[in-house]
Amino acid sequence: MPSSTTFTKKSGSLLLNNFLETAQVIIISLAIVFLVRSYLIQPFLVKGASMEPNFQDGNYLIIDELSYKIRAPERGEVIVFHYPRDPKQYFIKRIIGLPNERVEIKNQEVRIYNKDNPNGQKVDEKYLPADIITRGNLTEQLGSNEYFVLGDNRQASSDSRVWGSLPAENIVGRTLVRAWPIEQAKIY
């Protein structure tokens, strides 16, 4: 009988140890997931047609939040940001103009003026199909912490042509991976 009691105590102790070990693994895992999601990457779902044909409604994206803590955003990158007129909303657009540049849209052409190109240079938009044109007639001088962003679907995009420059502090991160739909998965 005493061996049975000892066996029960060991079994209870073993059960408690297993429970505590499992709880510890769960807590550590949740902490890691929280830190990764809060500071490194974040999932986003594309809503709307403003980035077609490159990103469609329903695409599931993973956004890199770390890169811009190390380096500045670059022209042509697709970013997710807080909409300047309503920071609760997230928008996805492509960076066209960088800080301290002048962006000009005229004759369906986007030109950038900066210290390297004082006479302007047409933006090479290889990511757009040839039939997509940029409507509008505007000139925007960007400040030291401002970006000019456009949707790839220039006919159906509320972007810097409508609401002006994007403050750098509104940028959440750059598109890193299109994870869904799986047949369109891609790393950027």
Image (cartoon, rainbow, N blue to C red):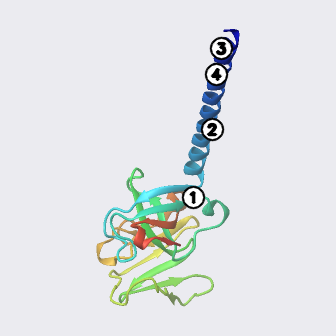
Q: In the image as oriented, which residue stretches furthest toward the top? A: 1
Task: Report helix, strand or loop for mark 3.
Answer: helix
Residue 25 bears which disc, if any? Answer: 2
Disc 3 or 4, which lies upstream in sequence?
3
What amino acid is found at the position of numbered circle 4 in the picture?
A: Ser
Q: CA distance from mark 2 to mark 1?
A: 26 Å
Q: Nearer the N terminus, badge 1 or badge 3?
A: 3
How far across and how far down the image is residue 20, in percent?
63, 28
Q: CA distance from mark 2 to mark 4?
A: 21 Å
Residue at numbered disc 3 = 4
> Disc 4 designates what residue?
11
Q: Kindly identify which residue carries mark 1.
A: 65
Q: Secondary structure at mark 4?
A: helix
Closer to the chain start, of discs 2 and 3, is 3
**What's under tag 2, amino acid-wise?**
Val
Q: Quadrant of the N terminus?
A: top right
